[in-house]
Image (cartoon, grey):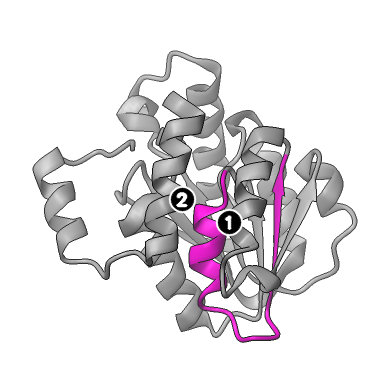
Amino acid sequence: MVTLVPEEIEEYAGGHTTPLPELLDELVAVTREKMGGLSMMLSGQVEGTFLQMLAASLGAKRILEIGMFTGFSAQMMAAALPENGELITCDVNPQAIEIAKSFFARSPHGHKITVREGPALETLKTLEPPFDLVFIDADKENYTNYYEASLPLLGPNGIIAVDNVLWSGNVLDPKDESGKAIVAFNDHVQADERVTNVLLTVRDGLTLIRKK
C-alpha cells in the first residue's frame, strides 16, 4: 500500500481505526494473492474507513466511484448507504471485476452496488444527477476529464474525493506521465473558482472538493 508516512505511524493509525469486517480482510488477502503488485492500489483500512465516515456524514444516498479495482472501497462506502441506497462503480479490468463481483455477492451491502464495465467517461455520459459523493481513483491521465464530467453530476452539498493526488511525493518533481497528469489536475482544481478544495496527506494524498 502506498503511504507517505513512516510504516510504524501507518500501523499505529491502523491500530487505532475501526477494524475491517472479516470479508474485507479476506478481500485484501485475495487481492494480494491474485493481483500481485497491483494490490498496492487498494485503498486500505484507514482511507477506506475515512471514505465510509465521509459518506455517512453526508447522509449519502447515491455514490459514484470511478475506478473500482477489486471493490474494497466500494464495499466500505456502500456500508454507509441506506438499504435503498445506490453505488455505481466503474472499471475496465476483467480480472479485478471478477474478484469484486464475487465478494459483492457475499456482502450484506452488495445489493446496493452496480458495476458498470467499460470506459468510465462513456458511463458518465449515461448517468443522471445528483450524486452525494464521487470517488475518483482510476487512470491518472484522465483525472481532469473525470473531474469535469463528475462536477455536473454532483448534488448541491456533495463532495468529490480524489485519490493519489501526491503520487508518492513525486508531484514536487514529476517524471512520468501519470505524475505530470496529477500535477496538472491539482493545478486545475486549485484554479477552479467554482469549488472549494482541500488536499489531505492521507495515504497517497486525498483531495476533497465541493461546489461553492
Q: Which of the 4 image quarters holds residue 20?
A: bottom left
- Residue 200 colored magenta? no
Which secondary structure, mark 1? helix
Q: Which of the 4 image quarters holds residue 150?
A: bottom right
Residue stretch rendered in magenta on the structure: 70-91
In percent of width and height, residue 62 lies at 68, 74
In percent of width and height, residue 168 lies at 33, 31
- Identified by mark 1, the residue type is Phe
- Residue 89 colored magenta? yes
**Residue 7 shows in this picture:** yes
Proximity of marks 1 and 2: CB atoms separated by less than 8 Å? yes
In percent of width and height, residue 34 lies at 50, 31
- Identified by mark 2, the residue type is Leu
Mark 1, residue position: 103
Mark 2, residue position: 27
**Separation of disc 1 and disc 2 at Cα?**
7 Å
Tell me which residue sits at (57%, 52%) in the image: 71
Tell me which residue sits at (79%, 51%) in the image: 116
